[in-house]
Amino acid sequence: MLFEKLIRPALYRLAGNDPETVHERTVRALSLLRAEPPLLRGIYAEDDPATVFGLSFPNRVGLAAGMDKDGRALHAWPALGFGFVEVGTVTRLAQPGNPKPRLFTLAGNDAVINRMGFNNSGADALAAKLAARGKPGVPLGISIGKSKVVPLGEAVEDYRYSLRALYPYADYFAVNVSSPNTPGLRELQDKAALAELLGELQRTSADLGTTPLLVKVAPDLTDSALAELLEVCDAHGVAGVIATNTTLSRNGLTGPEAAAGAEAGGLSGRPLAERAREVVKFVHTHSGLPIIGVGGVLCGPDARRMLDAGASLVQVYTGFALKGPGLIREINRTLAGWR
């Protein structure tokens, strides 16, 4: 409540009401922590160990990709209660992302629209940073995507390069084929294209070790398309599914902020919650794959509903941005002892 009523409004005023400036300043400030402060973790964390796709997690709440694309604040996130961290989405080539403005906060709807476009410093830069600074004290996921300038026909090698460069540092890889903000990317969810991509990534991974590969899916797929995607995942030994990415739908936006729905980009937050749980339930029902549930987790009960729908872990981004670290403490306490 303090964060929502006082701290967040103050941050926005100081940033000229620009959400991306708030985001950048927050990550920059957290990046000053080069070691995990035990005091903070004692406030926000709650140990509730879980083992999923062969990895041990201190609790079930993770930071979703997008918050810390370049792994700048890796030692801060565990201190704020996260049981795992996913960085990226990172691409082979460094890229600036889409033109600004590209991030829009709809606080009255507990929602965000973004069209960031995989702005990041590239796979080699992230690898160098991880080599120099080390990994966080919790499992590290790395989300990999396609460089914007690379044609779809060359996407496989683009992904493989990032996988190889970052393999020594990832506890799992998230294969992002579902962002709506890179032209043509979602075509890689199609059966043939996904089969080719996952086949090559699994062969590359097998040559390097046994790091789990997960696939992040869009909430906008039909049931039949999602069922085909799950068949491909099963056929290629995918370790799990992340459900879901942001949505192109604007269902659920209400009030004066509904007009902002005309902005291009992916919608996250409260309006996505129901659909994200539906996708989690579908994946759980139609496959035996472990699931990381993400989308509209804005309170402890939201996280519990994700697990009840079939997720084994949850991730938070928009909820953290809107409600602050107290949300992570609430979720941890709500989920402690679940199952």
Image (spheres, helix red, strand yellow):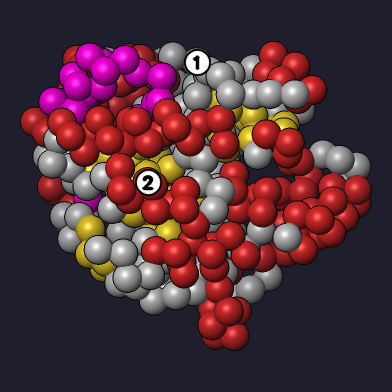
Mark 1 crowd level (few <14, some 14–19, many ≥20, 10 Å Cα): some
Residue 241 placement (x, y as % from top left): 28, 40
The answer to whether one can see residue 106 in this image is yes
Q: Which of 303/54 is in front?
A: 303
Mark positioned earlier in the residue sequence (1 or 2):
1
Res. 306 mark = 2
Q: Residue at x 64, y 29 (%)?
A: 113
Camera-side residue of 252 and 127: 252
Q: Is residue 58 above or below residue 170?
A: below
On screen, 307 above or below 336?
A: above
Q: Where is the C terminus found, in terms of image quarters? A: bottom left
Q: Is residue 41 left or right of residue 48?
A: right
- Residue span colored magenta: 212-233
- Separation (CA) of disc 1 from disc 2: 30 Å
Q: Position of residue 266 (x, y in %)?
A: 56, 25
Q: Position of residue 217 (x, y in %)?
A: 35, 30
Residue 242 is a magenta residue = no
Q: Amino acid at mark 2?
A: Met
Determine whether the residue tagged by mark 1 lies in a helix, strand or loop.
Answer: loop
**Dot 1 corresponds to which residue?**
183
Instruction: Please identify the quarter of the rendering in which residue 281 is found.
Output: top left
Residue 117 appears in the rendering = no
